[in-house]
Amino acid sequence: MAVASLSEIIQSYIMRRNSINLDLTRYSNQKTLSTAQTADLAAWKNSRYTALRAEYKNIFTATYKDNESYTYVDYTELPEYQDEISYVDSYYEAKVEDLTAWETQLDNQITTINTELSEINSYIDSFKQMLSNNIKVDYNYGTNS
């Protein structure tokens, strides 16, 4: 009976280990997704900067460049341009903070689950040793008489 009980315990730990490995795969995939989103966000910021530069360069050339009443040297001094750039920067920073918090949370979950996985592997090894010892004792019990 002890052999059957130990075997059942080992199987339950193996099932939990498999579940943990599945969770680790999911967390790793989410971390990869987070990294990709961070790269996409940086690409969005650069493309938005490029679009704003082109747009405000055209506005400056058409409206302000030859007009003597304005003292703007180039399009980067336009208040509207500065407001747009500030918006892009603040949006980018907020999104990066969110992604960083998400990555930190994922790292914490991965660390916690790795600890549990190590414990389970230790339990499995321990129970396998006990099972092996019980089988040896049962086998030797009949031969010593």
Image (cartoon, rainbow, N blue to C red):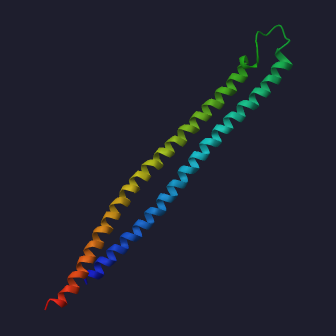
Residue projecting furthest to the top = 68
Q: Judge from the rendering whether residue 105 lies leftward or rightward of residue 93; answer left or right.
A: left
Identify whether 9 is placed above or below 84. below
Quadrant of the image containing the C terminus:
bottom left
Q: For residue 39, what is the image quadrant?
A: top right
Q: Judge from the rendering whether residue 16 lies leftward or rightward of residue 78; answer left or right.
A: left
Q: Nearer the viewer, residue 145 or 52?
A: 145
Residue shown at 44%/53% (left/top)?
110
Identify whether 140 is placed above or below 76. below
Measuring from the top left, give residue 83's x and y in whole percent. Answer: 68, 24
Residue projecting furthest to the left = 145
Measuring from the top left, give residue 102's x and y in whole percent. Answer: 51, 45
Measuring from the top left, give residue 34's x and y in whole percent. Answer: 56, 47
Quadrant of the image containing the N terminus:
bottom left
Q: Nearer the viewer, residue 54 or 130?
A: 130
Residue shown at 64%/26% (left/top)?
86
Measuring from the top left, give residue 59's x and y in whole percent. Answer: 82, 22
Q: For residue 90, what is the image quadrant?
A: top right
Q: Nearer the viewer, residue 1 or 124?
A: 124
Residue shown at 40%/66% (left/top)?
17
Residue shown at 65%/42% (left/top)?
40
Q: Count the marks.
A: 0
